[in-house]
Each structure stands twice: as C-alpha cells, then as structure tokens.
C-alpha cells in the first residue's frame, strides 16, 4: 500500500492515459498512413483491419477505451490467418506490410495510454516508408510528405506540454519542422554512404501489379489493346536521336504458338552469337519503369551493355532480377548488322513449329506461295504486298475472331493491329518453310523537346516478325508497316482512324496541354534519373565529380554539412530579443544624456527623466528652468501625446541648452 | 520469497544513489538568486521514445538498403532530420532562459510550500512545457510565451524551521517527447515554516498565560510617560515619528499601563507539553489573540517580545517560534 494514497502512481504520471482528443487524432493519422496499403490489400483483409478502427471509434463513443483480451486475440489470429491465406506466406514485402498494417490496427485497438500512442505514431512513420516499396512516383512522394507532416503534428499533439495549445500552433510547428528537416534530409540523401543491396532477401515481383508489357501474345483473345499512356521507359541518347522508323525496341522473342497464344517456348542457355557490325552504333541509357519482368528493351542488336545481366541467343537482353523499381541500363547497339552464325537444328525446328489443328487456309496459302515463288525473300515480299494491296485495315478495335484466328483475320475480318498482322505473317512464313518468329516490344517513342529524351509509352507497344534468310540471318519484317506505314513513320496517332483516336486523348499532338505534358514528363524523368536512380554507383560517380572518392569522404562531408546547417539553425533559434525601437523623443533625450555624460553627469539606470534633471539642476542651478522644461516636454511626449510641435520644441530646447 | 533479495538490492542501490546525489549536489555551485541557462548547464538525453524511434529508423534504413529504395531512404532521412531538429528544439526550449528565485511567504508546518520560480526568456523564442522537480511529479506544464511568468515548485509537507529548497531541476520534453532536457537549479530559496497551530488547552486564561501585573512600573499602553531610544523589539506604532523628523534618530514613546489586561504567552509555563507541542500551542494562541485584537507578548527562554498587536508583531513572534532551538 502506498503511504500517500492521493499521490498518483509513478506509471500513471510517466505514462498517462490516452485522452479522447489525441486518440481521435491518432486514428486520423492511422487512416492516412494505411489507406494506400488497405487499397492494395485483398478486400477481406482490408475490411477486417478497417473494422478495428470502427470498433475503436465505437468504444470511444461508448466511453470505454480498452478492448477486451479475447477481442485482441481474435483480431490477431484473424489478421495473421487472412494474410497467410491471401499471400501464401507472411514474409515478403506484400504480406509483411499487410501484417504490419494489421498490427497497427491491433495496437490502436488496445491503445490506452501515452506509450501505445507513441508506438502507433512510430508504426505510422514506418508504414509511410513501406508504401514506397510499391510505388515511388512524384505524386506518392508528395502524399507521403503530407503524411509525415500529419504524423509529426500528431506526435507534437501527444506531448503533454502541448495538450491545451491551439491546433493551429501545433500544425504550424509540424509544418515548420518538416520544412526545416528537408535540407538536412537532402544532404543525408546525397552523402549517406550507400551500399549495394540486397542485405537479406531479394524483393519478389508482385503478382498483382499490372503493366502494359506481357511476356506472351494472344492475338484476338482480348480484342482491345491496353490503351494506356503510362510511360514504359525513357531513353537518353548520346548524340542524335535515330529516325522514327528505326526505333524498334526489342523486348521478347516468341517462338511457340499453340493456336491461341505466342510464348517464348523452351529457353536455351547460350550466349548471343557474333554478328557483323555495319554502320554507326548508337549509345543510349534507358530508364525503365518497373514492369515486374526481367526483360530489358534494346534497339536491335546490343553490342555492349552495362547494368544488365545477360544477352541470350535471341539477342534479347535481360536483367538479373525482375524489375520492381525504376532501373537504368546502358546499351551500345547496332541497327545495321548481319548475323553470320548458322541456324541450329533445334532452331529450325522451333522456327517452323505450327499447331496442326488450326488455320488450314493460312497454311495452304503459305504452301501455295512456296510452290509458286520458291525464293524466301520473294515470299516475304509477296506477303507484305498482300497486306498492302488487299483491303486490310489498321484499327485498335478489331472485330472478334473465331477458332482459327489467322484464317479468320486473313480471309474474313481483315481488321486488326500489330499483333494480328505479325501473327498471320509468321504463320504464313512458317507454312512456307521459312523460319520465323514473333518479336514483341515497343515501336517509336516521343521526343520531349525539353530534355531531348525519348519517352516510350505503353501505347507504343508493338509486335513484329523476324525471318531467317540464308546469308542474311535474322531479318526484321514489320507487316504492320505494309498496312499502316504512318504507324511506323510517325506514331500511333497518325495511323489510327478518327473514331479510335478519341479514345486515346494523350496521343493527340495538337492537344493544348501538350506543353504541360512535356514539362511533366521532363520533371518525371528528372525524378527518375536523380532521385530514384540514385544508387551506389550513381552516388560514387556523382560525388567523384566533387572530389569525394570514398565512403569516408562522403561521411565527413555529410557530418560537416549537417553540423553547419544545425549551427545556423541553433544560431537562428538563439537569436536575441528584437531591439526595442526608440521613439524620436527618446532619441533626442538620449542624445541630451550623452552630452551631459561627457560633462561628467551620466544618467543612472534607475533614474527617471525627472530625477535626472533634478540632479543636474543641483549642479547647474542657473539652468534649472531650462532643465525642467526639457524634462516636462519629454515626459509629455512620452506619456501623453506625440506631437510634431512638441517634438520641435524639445529639439530646440536640447540644441539650445548650454551648460 | 523472491522479494527479499530484490528489496535488499534496492536498499543497497538506494544507498549508492544517495551518495551519488550528495556528490552531485556538492559539485553544483549555488546560483544565488538567479541563473541563466546556458549550454554548460543544460543536459539533453533521448527518452525511451527517442530510443524507440531510433530503433524504428535503423530498421527503416536496413529495409531501404535491402530494397535499394531511394524514396524510403529519403523518408528515413527525413524522419531522422525531424528527430535531430527535435533535439535542438528541446535544447532551445531551455537555453537563454533566466530563472529568478521568487519569494515564498511563510507557511505553517504540515502544509506544502509553493515556491515560485520566475522564468524570463532572454530571446524571442517562446517556451513551452517546462516542469520543475522530478519527472514523477504530476504538474501543470509551464509556458513562457513572451514576458516573464512564474512556475511554482510545490514541496512535500514541511516541518518547523527554515526550509532550504534543495537542488531541483527544471526539465522539458518539448516538442516531440523524444528528448529530455534538464538543468539543475540550486537557488538561494528558503521558506520559513511556523509551528503547526494546535490547541491543547481550552482558554487563554490557562497556565501558559500570565496576566499583566497591575503595577505602575509595568510598561503599558495607556498613559504617555516619555521617550526613550528605540529598541529593536519596539512596535512601529510606538516610534516617535515627529521626534524622528527633528533629530533623525529613532525614538520610542513609552506608556504606563493602568488597566492592564495584556497577555503574556510564556513557553516556560507550559510544563505539561512536549517542546514542539508547546510551540504549536503558542502559535495557536498568537493567532487567536490577533483574531480577537488582544495585545500579547511572547516569552521564550532567553528571548522576550514586548506586548503589542498587529501583523508585524504577529510575524515577529511566529518567526521566533519557527526558529526556536532549531537544530
């Protein structure tokens, strides 16, 4: 038993119970920091976690703060089980963050004192950071910054010293602190020694992410192309931009067709064969938006590359790991080339593979051309001519196809986009005994006049064909070019019929917002280059420019700069009281005092003007009258009214005073 | 039982603590009547929440490294910077703060004194959430917005004598609660503690009292009998002010009492009480006399205060009681 029963327990003072106002604020913070996560999570799980918030609100309303133990246990088990069921694991950044959001909900549910609230605050900061594992766009960053201000506001509000201060004061303080923290953050961001990751686990690509790039092609299965203006990647060329019709960004090579879908077929672990370089090479840096695949895009034949893993037998460049965040790689490639190596037997077999039960008419046509023309090149030209001269149309909204996609397309509908043409073309070639394959990637891109970079969007996705011609090797053939040359020469916008165009407003060149769009694109590009692309290598290269060579240097300069920043900050914080502004009367009287001080009669700190004048009068009895007048007019100016006339009078009295 | 060794350990720990505190106390010099907090006198350490935040940030840093995620690096650094700034804010909340010892009126034993400290910021920064004493005391935070303001340190119940305020601290966790900053205060600040007024006897006419004798040579209040040199125990009522104007010397008027029902409160006569109880009783009587406007005098061993009435007289008497034979 405590001797002083009226004295609150130590724990109670150090860890006071949570009041309802801070609790409400805490809930707001938790909602803000977990919304992005909840929207990404499976609905069941989100609903369960959101219910914690609802329950807490209800409890707050009913006036009791603490959830029962059974409720907490049930909630914990429920969340963990749901996470496990939804993701198949509780590890990894998706399941992990879901679990974390769940734990935050749990903490909120049981929050009853100051300590719980502080833990919630720290978890909220953590969740804000975790959100960056999913998206790192400028918009996300801006929203996260707002969140940090909000969380900091809540942190300040939880401090018992400020319970009763007005919220405007706390909000201003939080905002001020975050703004002051930004420069220090920038220094740390640039100079904090970075080490190449990962430390423990490789981030797995998330299955839920949607992108425009797919590693298979199913012409006619979904009859509309992803009509997205999202950026796929951006390219910076060292030198002039190549011509538009040379911008074939090779992605994946598809060998195998099963009647519905093209895919890679069996992969071969061998490196790229040699090729004969012709003409000039192109040097460029690609900044790739995350697409959750290993595929990297290059212009035709890469000769040299950096920050990429492997160039395979199909001249297809790939990364070591799936691209889950903005990444950069450098390539040196040739658009004119000749492949000397022989086609291996297994490649002949793959290059001529055809599903037996599909497209009889297409196969018959191919065979017929073979019999008529004989020469492979002639057959290729014949096919292109066929597309060009028969009434084929280019459209993004083709009519649906039946079971035999190629037959239906070639002989019935005759409307489609790149996938349709490349599919039909490759099948025709294979039927005519010419090894052929489908290549998917992007075609073209848009030059941004602001930074002269090329922006390639999802809407630039394209599919074309490659055929093996003896003596030339793999040769690119784009059957779409035969139908819609403007798609190749200019862009998608130019190739589309009017009614399609309206569906893709971002394409339109004449849009009044084009300048703004370009600017935003340039800003986004800068963000990717300088912020998201700031990796250990970039850091070393960048800082070497300023003569900083290694981590030790980085650290010294960082600590130094932060020290300077904080010194300036401290100095500003300790700035003295603002000088009191003197009135004109005070200035005049002070002047008078200084004059008297020179005569040996300095005014004491404790003397009023009248006291001082009395003392002076004892020493200068003759001037008593004048002295009294000075004191009187000074006092009137100071304490009764300020008037110009009186001021002039005082000035005259003081100037005319002779000791 | 497991508590025994623990409590033993506790007492040993406490003994060390007390020794250490003594050592600390001896190291801190008295500040006189005022102290201005500067970098040398302010301490700052992280609170447990500060450590929690640090752990969270370290986790974030590791995560950022693992995922090579620029934005989460950025957030880690942003929150770190906020923390560092928080430390400076905490320090800035204390530095350049002038603390003056305020006067505390005397109290009676058994009451707790509220000892005021006057806080004046020497720069334009307003101060928030300042506390006095240890962190385990429940108190209202002190805010100093612009001009000076007072913060009271309330003591435990005190016993008779002069209570010298021991070393205490002024502290704050403003603004984030992740840093704790404090400074030691050892100002010359004392409170006079009168005895606790207690009634052991019913009436004034009991043994502790000694009615004034009806003799003409007793000095009373009624008839003016002349002027003599002022003595320190004389009431200001009796100072001959007119004489002072003439001679610039303090003189007291003397009177001869005739109908003298003056009261003498005598310590020696309260034989059946313990010494402290005697003082309590005397204290109570003094208050009673003042309430009833009965002039009284006080006799303590070796010290007599002449008969008088009034606030000043009361204060004088109570002060004697407070400091009577204090060890």
Image (cartoon, coloured by chain):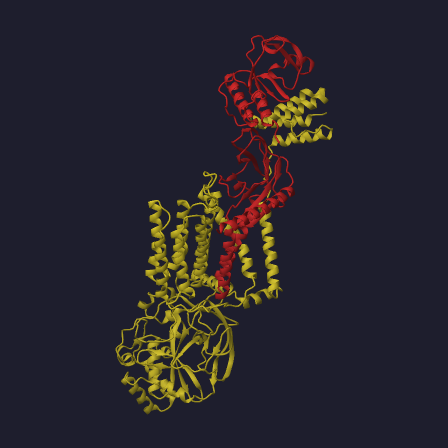
**The N terminus of chain A lies in quadrant:** top left
Is A77 situated left or right of A564 in this image? left
> Residue A571: image x %, image y %?
60, 47
Viewer-proximal residue among A523 and B153: B153
**The C terminus of chain A lies in quadrant:** top right
Viewer-proximal residue among B235 and B119: B235
Residue A292 lies, with reference to residue A564, above or below; the image says below
Q: Residue at x 61, y 56 (%)?
A: A560
> Residue A222: image x %, image y %?
30, 72
Which chain can be seen in red?
B
Q: How many marks can you see?
A: 0
Residue A532 lies, with reference to residue B175, above or below; the image says below
Is residue B100 at least partly visible in the picture? yes
Where on the picture, by quarter, is residue A403?
A: bottom left
Residue A14 lies, with reference to residue B211, above or below; the image says below
Is residue B178 at least partly visible in the picture? no
Residue at the extreme right: A599
Q: Residue at x 47, y 47 (%)?
A: A156
> Residue A627: image x %, image y %?
67, 23
Which chain can be seen in yellow?
A
Residue B160 lies, with reference to residue A499, above or below; the image says above
């Amino acid at each position: 038993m405590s001797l002083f029963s009226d004295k609150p327990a130590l724990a109670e003072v150090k860890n006071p119970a949570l009041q309802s106002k801070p609790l409400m604020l805490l809930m707001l913070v938790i909602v803000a920091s977990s919304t992005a996560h909840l929207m990404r999570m499976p609905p069941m799980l989100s609903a369960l976690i959101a219910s914690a918030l609802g329950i807490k609100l209800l409890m707050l309303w009913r006036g009791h703060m603490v959830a029962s133990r059974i409720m907490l246990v049930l909630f914990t088990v429920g969340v963990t089980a749901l996470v496990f069921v939804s993701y198949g694991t509780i590890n990894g950044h998706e399941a992990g963050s879901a679990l974390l959001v769940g734990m935050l909900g749990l903490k909120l549910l049981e929050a009853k004192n100051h300590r719980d609230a502080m833990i919630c605050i720290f978890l909220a900061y953590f969740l804000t950071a975790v959100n960056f594992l999913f998206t790192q766009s400028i918009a996300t960053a801006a929203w996260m910054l707002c969140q940090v201000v909000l969380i900091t506001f809540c942190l300040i509000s939880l401090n018992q010293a400020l319970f009763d201060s007005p919220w405007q004061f706390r909000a201003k303080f939080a905002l001020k602190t975050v703004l002051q923290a930004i420069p220090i953050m920038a220094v740390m961001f640039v100079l904090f020694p970075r080490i190449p990751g990962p430390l423990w686990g490789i981030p797995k690509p998330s299955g839920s992410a949607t992108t425009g790039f797919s590693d298979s092609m199913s012409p006619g299965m979904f009859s509309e192309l992803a009509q997205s203006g999202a950026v796929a990647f951006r390219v910076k060329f060292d030198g002039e931009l190549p011509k538009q019709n040379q911008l074939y960004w090779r992605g994946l090579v598809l060998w195998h067709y099963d009647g519905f879908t093209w895919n890679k077929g069996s992969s071969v672990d061998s490196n790229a064969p040699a090729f004969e370089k012709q003409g000039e090479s192109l040097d460029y840096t690609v900044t790739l938006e995350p697409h959750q695949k290993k595929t990297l895009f290059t212009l035709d034949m890469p000769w040299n590359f950096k920050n990429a893993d492997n160039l395979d037998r199909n001249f297809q460049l790939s990364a070591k790991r799936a691209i889950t965040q903005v990444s950069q790689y450098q390539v040196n490639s040739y658009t004119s080339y000749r492949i000397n190596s022989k086609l291996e037997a297994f490649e002949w077999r793959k290059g001529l593979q055809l599903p037996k039960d599909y497209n009889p008419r297409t196969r018959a046509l191919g065979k017929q051309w073979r019999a008529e023309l004989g020469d492979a090149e002639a057959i290729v030209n014949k096919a292109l001519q066929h597309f060009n001269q028969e009434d084929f149309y280019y459209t993004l909204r083709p009519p649906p196809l039946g079971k035999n996609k190629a037959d239906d397309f070639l002989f019935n509908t005759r409307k489609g986009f790149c996938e349709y043409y490349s599919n039909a073309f490759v099948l025709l070639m294979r039927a005519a005994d010419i090894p052929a394959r489908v290549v998917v990637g992007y075609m073209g891109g848009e030059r941004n006049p602001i930074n002269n970079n090329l922006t390639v969007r999802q809407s630039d996705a394209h599919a074309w064909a490659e055929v093996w011609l003896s003596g030339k090797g793999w040769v690119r053939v784009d059957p779409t070019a035969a139908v819609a040359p403007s798609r190749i020469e200019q862009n998608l916008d130019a190739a589309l019929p009017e009614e399609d165009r309206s569906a893709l407003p971002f394409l339109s060149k004449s849009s009044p917002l084009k300048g703004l769009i370009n600017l935003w694109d340039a800003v986004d590009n800068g963000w990717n280059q300088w912020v998201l692309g700031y990796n250990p290598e970039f850091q070393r290269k960048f800082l070497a420019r300023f003569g900083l060579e290694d981590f030790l240097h980085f650290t010294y300069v960082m600590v130094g700069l932060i020290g300077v920043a904080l010194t300036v900050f401290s100095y500003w914080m300790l700035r003295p009281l603002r000088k009191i502004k003197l009135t004109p009367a005070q200035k005049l009287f002070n002047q008078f005092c200084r004059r008297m001080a020179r005569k040996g009669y300095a005014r004491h700190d404790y003397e009023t003007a009248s006291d001082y004048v009395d003392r002076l009068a004892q020493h200068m009895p003759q001037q008593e009258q004048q002295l009294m007048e000075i004191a009187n007019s000074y006092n009137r100016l100071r304490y009764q009214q300020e008037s110009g006339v009186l001021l002039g009078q005082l000035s005259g009295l003081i100037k005319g005073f002779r000791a | 039982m497991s508590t025994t060794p623990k409590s033993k350990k506790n007492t040993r720990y406490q003994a060390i603590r007390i020794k250490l505190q003594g050592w600390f106390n001896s190291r801190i010099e008295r500040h006189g009547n005022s102290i201005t907090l500067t970098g040398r006198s302010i301490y700052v350490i992280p609170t447990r929440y500060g450590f929690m935040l640090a752990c969270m940030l370290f986790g974030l840093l590791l995560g950022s490294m693992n995922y090579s995620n620029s934005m989460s690096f950025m957030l880690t650094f942003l929150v770190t910077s906020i923390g560092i700034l928080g430390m400076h804010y905490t320090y800035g909340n204390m530095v350049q703060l002038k603390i003056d010892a305020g006067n505390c009126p005397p109290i009676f034993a058994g009451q707790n004194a509220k000892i005021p400290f006057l806080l004046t910021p020497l720069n334009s920064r307003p101060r928030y959430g300042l506390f006095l004493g240890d962190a385990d005391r429940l108190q209202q935070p002190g805010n100093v917005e612009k001009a000076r303001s007072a913060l009271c340190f309330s003591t435990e119940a005190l016993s008779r004598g002069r209570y010298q305020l021991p070393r205490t601290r002024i502290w704050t966790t403003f603004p984030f609660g992740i840093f704790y900053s404090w400074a030691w205060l050892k100002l010359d600040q004392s409170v006079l503690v009168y005895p606790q007024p207690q009634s052991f006897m019913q009436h004034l006419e009991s043994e502790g009292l000694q009615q004034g004798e009806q003799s003409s040579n007793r000095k009373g209040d009624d008839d003016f009998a002349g002027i003599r040199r002022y003595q320190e125990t004389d009431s200001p009522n009796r100072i001959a002010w007119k004489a002072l104007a003439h001679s610039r010397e303090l003189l007291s008027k003397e009177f001869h009492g005739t109908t003298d029902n003056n009261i003498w409160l005598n310590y020696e006569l309260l034989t059946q009480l313990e010494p402290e109880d005697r003082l309590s009783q005397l204290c109570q009587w003094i208050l009673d006399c003042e309430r009833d406007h009965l002039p009284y005098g006080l006799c303590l061993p070796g010290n007599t205060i002449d008969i008088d009435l009034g606030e000043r007289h009361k204060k004088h008497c109570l002060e004697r009681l407070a400091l009577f034979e204090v060890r």
